[in-house]
Image (tube, rainbow, N blue to C red):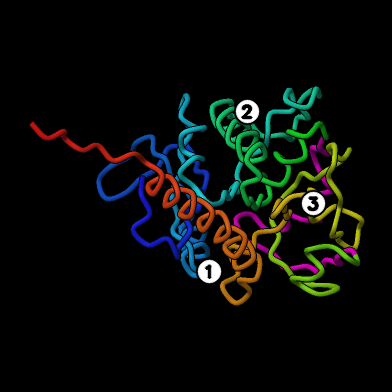
Amino acid sequence: MTRADPRRPLIGVTTYHDDAAWSVWHQRADLVPRTYVDAVVGAGGTAVLLPPQPGGAEHLLDALDGLVLAGGPDLDPAGYGAPADPRTGPPHPARDDWESTLLRAALARDLPLLGVCRGMQLLNVELGGTLLQHLPDGSHQKVPARFVRHRIVTADGSRLAALLGPDADVPCYHHQAVDRLGTGLRPTAHAADGTVEALELDGRRFALGVQWHPETDPDDPRLFHALIAAAQGTAAQITSARATSAQMAPTHRESSP
């Protein structure tokens, strides 16, 4: 992977591995809602889809400038030491393992990352936190397959407050939520019922998780613009390092006869 245009950071977006249908075909496929790609591209990045697979995460992240952990099905409660609630969806071990590996590698590199819904929950679990496996019916997932907007209040002094202001109206669709916080994470937004709506990992260039779905709201691209701005710093650093390496590379001259 190379950067034909270093001004557009490469942003990895995690994907589903699921049954899908198109044209005359019905097959297993790796996919993600187009809204994620549109959000990344609209904010000035280039989206790179990251399907679950065995191995390769370290190599991939060496080539990327940022990471989006997309929303999706419930995490396996075994990953945070809890028995499954009857209302928790079936496990997706390949995706859980793949995204956990990507997340750990991104944190080790201080790669800018944005966790969306499941992605925020994964960030919490990966850092030792736990989840509430089911919120009251109709509270945050009111209508099947439809995002419903609600108000969140941000924490004073947080990165999120600097981006969105003291409150915001956001598109929501989830039935699980953060319970015990993971190590180093700070809740930086809440819903009216107290549900944690955003997490930040302090001391990082950009490590933010939100419980809502900003990719579905093209009228409010602020979170994706912030991710891309942070990722542009990564792209600039890599371009500079490559240029320095090229300048320092020894030249080989043939000796005269």
Give, as a single range, the part of the protein colored magenta.
130-155
Residue at point 86%, 73% (across, down):
166
Q: Which mark is residue 199?
A: 3
Between marks 2 and 1 in the image, the one whose residue lies nearer the viewer: 1
Q: Is residue 224 above or below residue 256?
A: below
Between discs 2 and 1, the one toward the N terminus: 1
Q: Which residue is mark 1?
A: 43
Local SS, label 3 = strand
Q: CA distance from mark 2 to mark 1?
A: 33 Å
Q: Quadrant of the N terminus?
A: top left
Q: Which amino acid is tagged 1?
A: Ala
For marks 3 and 1 on the same chain, the one whose residue lies earlier in the sequence:
1
What is the distance, in whole Å, between disc 3 and disc 1 at their CAs?
22 Å
Identify the secondary structure beneath mark 2. loop
The answer for how far apart the CA atoms under marks 2 and 3 are is 24 Å
Horizontal arrangement in the rendering, residue 221 relative to residue 59 (left or right)? right
Q: Which residue is mark 2?
A: 91
